Image (tube, coloured by chain):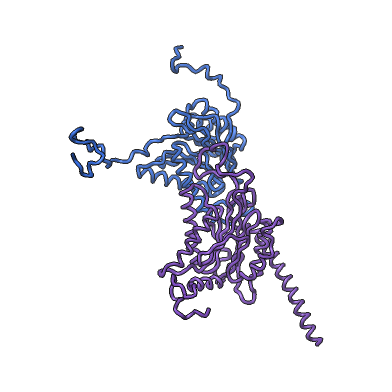
Amino acid sequence: MDHRPQAWGRPRDDVYGAYDASYLQNSGPKTVTQSPVVTGTSVIAIKFNEGVVIAADNLASYGSLARFTDVKRLRVFLDSSVVGFGGDVSDMQFLDRHLNELAIDEAYDAAEPTPETPTSPGTLNAANLHKYLQKLMYRRRNDFDPLWNQILVAGLDAASKPFLASVDLRGTAFTSPSLATGFGSALAQPIMRKYAATEEDAARLTREQAVDVVKECMKVLFYRDARSLDKYSIAVVTKAGVELKENEQLERQSWAFAERIKGYGTQTV
Amino acid sequence: MTSIGTGYDLANSIFSPDGRNFQVEYAVKAVENGGTSIGIRCKDGVVLAVEKVVASKLLKHGANKRIATVDRHLGVVYSGMVPDGRHFVDRARDEARAWRDTFKTPIPTADLASRLGGYMQAYTLYQSVRPFGITAIVGGFDSELDTPVDGEVGSGPKCGAGGKGEGKKHGGPFLYMIEPSGLYWGYYGAATGKGRQAAKAELEKLDLSGSGALSLEEAVKEAARIIYVAHDDNKDKEFELEMSWISGADGPTKGKHQEVPKALREEAERLAKKAIEKDLEGDDDEEEKKEGDKMEE
């Protein structure tokens, strides 16, 4: 019998034949981070005259299983921006902790608090934050170790104008008066475009209108997206700061339309 | 210091025969030349203040802050050698971050003080280093709330965090002072630097532990006054007053360490100057009286 340490713990050649060493090689690319596991679905956001409304439901799915039903996917950064995460939840946690470190770095040399900014936010605004996340995501893509998220950043830019932009797992970044990730880009985006097709349209929207549009979109998403939930978080970002509500319930649902849906499963008519 | 010059003060980590480490004692001397810093722990927060000596008129007013934020809820101020203090603050930030990496939660003030005390003490042990030429005051407010773990996504069990006793107080304001020897104690009021004697005398007059304890805003005003009292206009160089504060989640800073807002600081300075003038007038009256007595003689 082979007593060399190299053979310890291996099947015996004389019994099982030579071991197929190709199973041991690890020269190929790492693939463990190349698919999401526990995922969040759509994040939607729309600009209005003095800020941005952003919302995401509170579900984290494990495949098609509604695994965690109280997952908060909107994160506040420096009391002045909101980051909404779609995609892998563990990657979201990683990013959340990273952004927390970044926020503490900002506190090291925070400006003196003034009556306008009583909580003394740091110098990083939403536009800066979005640019940072875009660089981070693109770098991780180039390392073949992407963070499996699509992210919306809502807040204000350097000129205190409403700012809304998206970045995905490849580092692709863009901005628009309204944005949605995941299923929302197909289901919610057309509705939001009806109200804010251009920056000018968005600048005419009031806060109440914007909130109503977003709530309507969340309802449509719950009707049509099988990985969604009727509990959601919604945040309004303005110059005054961030108002985040994390345990909202979809109201006035009507499933009457469901009767008209035909052609699924064992249905024959 | 009769044993000076006997050779036991030439190196760190060598005791003198009567059990003293002279290098550490000399480091304390360096602290005693620095601008006064004080910390006040009151019932709803902590105030840190420093007499920032203006080394040159060419320096920008209000720039080059002396009070440092270590984590959201932690501040450090120090007297003595500023570069030593800067390095010390860097270390404090590293410790606070390392704690978060490990435990996913903010470092309690007591644990930060412990780690920094250990760090300071390590610099009294080796020939290759000298002790820190600073005494640092660490102030913090440990959250009294059920705070989420860093990166937490859900709301967790409804029963709240474990280990919470009914009716027991959790979190609160904390204040520590760390000396070059590595010695640290928790304080109600701490003072170090050139004006520490006067400052300590003033701090002792305040009610910081009793039931009628000072409010945070009063403490800010007292801190400003004490720095002004500790400053000797005739001997000392010009100075700027720098102040920061930390309150609980329901207080003005919402649990964060922040610079005291300009309006409040200026108000505190105005009151401080007024109090000083009053004191001086009182002194002058007495002196005049004495002179008057002499005249009569």
Q: Quarter-wise, where is residue B187 in the image?
A: bottom right
Q: Residue at x 52, y 55 (%)?
A: B111
Q: Quarter-wise, where is residue B175 in the image?
A: bottom right
Among the chains, which one is blue?
A
Counting from the top left corner in percent of width and height, residue B250 is at 64, 48
B97 or A268, which is in the foreground?
Answer: B97
* Above-or-below relation of A181 to B260: above
Which tint is chain B?
A: purple
B198 or A213, which is in the foreground?
Answer: B198
Q: Residue furthest front?
A: B18
Q: Residue furthest top?
A: A269
* Above-or-below relation of B279 to A4: below
B21 or A63, which is in the foreground?
Answer: B21
Q: Residue at x 45, y 69 (%)?
A: B130
Query: Residue A217 vs residue A35: left or right?
Result: right
Counting from the top left corner in percent of width and height, residue B286 is at 76, 77
B74 or B266, which is in the foreground?
Answer: B74
Query: Residue A28 vs residue B93: left or right?
Result: left
Q: Residue furthest right?
A: B296
Counting from the top left corner in percent of width and height, residue A168 is at 43, 39
Whether residue B257 is visible here, answered yes or no, is yes
Query: Residue B271 vs residue A202: left or right?
Result: right
Count of labels shown? 0
Counting from the top left corner in percent of width and height, residue A194 is at 54, 31
Q: Residue at x 62, y 47 (%)?
A: B168
Q: Quadrant of the C terminus of chain B?
A: bottom right
* Above-or-below relation of B15 to A164: below
